[in-house]
Amino acid sequence: MDVVIAIGVVIGAVVGVLGVVGVHWFLWRRLVWDTTERGSIARRVGTGVIVAGTALLIGAFASESAGVPFLITQIIAWPGYMWGALFVYLVLWLLVGELVRPLFRRWIAHSRTPEDAAETAAGDHPAPVSRRLFVSRAVGAAATLAAVTTVGYGTHSALTGPRVKQLTVPLANLPRAAHGFRIAVVSDIHLGPILGRGFAERVVETINGTQPDLIAVVGDLVDGSVEHLRSATEPLARLRARHGAYFVTGNHEYFSGAEQWIEHVQELGLRLLANSRTELPYFDLAGVNDIQGERIGQGPDFAAALGDRDLARTAVLLAHQPVQIHDAVEFGVDLQLSGHTHGGQLWPGNYLAGLANPTVAGLERYGDTQLYVTRGAGAWGPPVRVGAPSDITVVELASKQA
């Protein structure tokens, strides 16, 4: 069985590498080979840009885990990750171009008159650029312009910070006295080599501006160590809510030194819910560790967080990944608040996110449990959001007895 699994892994890796190489070849072929002359400076420059962009992207992903100095990581991250986003939309727009290409060629062929051909043959005009080269350059230029515009829009959307989203969630067992209780839900801030202190300050200002009763930070706060991001996270100490701010780990905390971050967020004034709960005046607030914590023996423990509670009380659960909803249903949770998906972040990433998550964004019901998934406040990798605007959601609990 182990041999079969190993063979499957190898085959999957080979297929993945071939796929990546194939996509890069397609991009190079359409943007460089088909649009430039053999041996030209333009062809060499175009090839160099694609190779350098890919190298920077790989470097941006690998630099943090490789122990590269944080300053170098910051320098590499911007061009590397931005190339990653541009690469995605260059490929998508070039695929659209494949549909347009034959129609464009046909239109050019029909637009040339017999007189044009005769004048060219007689030498009255210089020989025109070949139809194939003209179409390739036109499609390549249009795809590049569309990709740059898409990424530019998505970058502006991500860097200007999250918008506030309002949501009312009726809960059957919520006491009348808790009607209107407001929880500011923020997830996936991803402070790191790109999103830093300035972004954290905008997030804090936005949250405090909603004047919530409670703040729920639902994981993936950082991408990097406490040593490198101490200054970036300092604004979080200014989070204010009547019942405080609570934190549960996300998968990225376990890539960034979870034990140090667990200690540091508490120094910032956030209250940790690590497979535990607290009894608020009108309902129980519980939190479980992220699934990634299983790597170091700190995975989610629903029994510890919810096993001995009073089932007559409403339970609100903070759990980073939506897939944890299945355990929440089993333990009688009324509402689970999650993040993790970013809503896909880069369209059509929402379809890929849907393959691994029961809910990608928004509010859905699973049995007697409701699940709300925020698209998150920041961005992972490229600071770009397309078709998945960032948000901080103010969830207002509503009692059906009110």
Image (spheres, helix red, strand yellow):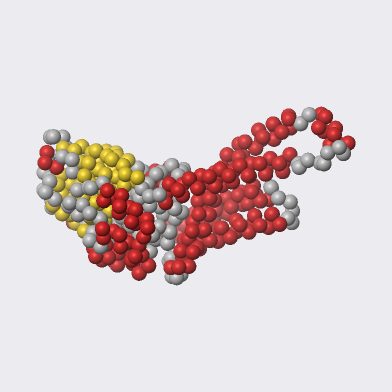
Closest to the observer: 219 or 150?
A: 150
Query: How many badges with numbers are in the image?
Result: 0
Left or right of residue 374: residue 21:
right
Left or right of residue 388: residue 18:
right
Q: Is residue 195 above or below residue 350?
A: below
Outermost residue on the right side: it is 122
Estimate the x, y position of residue 302 in percent, counting from the top left: 22, 53
Closest to the observer: 211 or 316?
A: 211
Give the residue displayed 15% in from the left and 54% down from the top: 278
Estimate the x, y position of residue 57 in percent, counting from the top left: 51, 59
Closest to the observer: 124 or 366?
A: 124
In the picture, residue 199 is in which quadrant? bottom left
Left or right of residue 90: residue 230:
left
Give the residue displayed 17% in from the left and 52% down from the top: 243
Closest to the observer: 45 or 239?
A: 239
Estimate the x, y position of residue 135 in percent, counting from the top left: 68, 40
Estimate the x, y position of residue 173 in percent, counting from the top left: 14, 39
Left or right of residue 74: residue 204:
left
Q: Quadrant of the C terminus?
A: top left
Can residue 158 be seen at all in this image of the molecule? yes
Give the residue displayed 13% in from the left and 52% down from the top: 279
Give the residue displayed 38% in from the left and 50% down from the top: 161
Can residue 15 be seen at all in this image of the molecule? no
Q: Quadrant of the N terminus?
A: bottom left
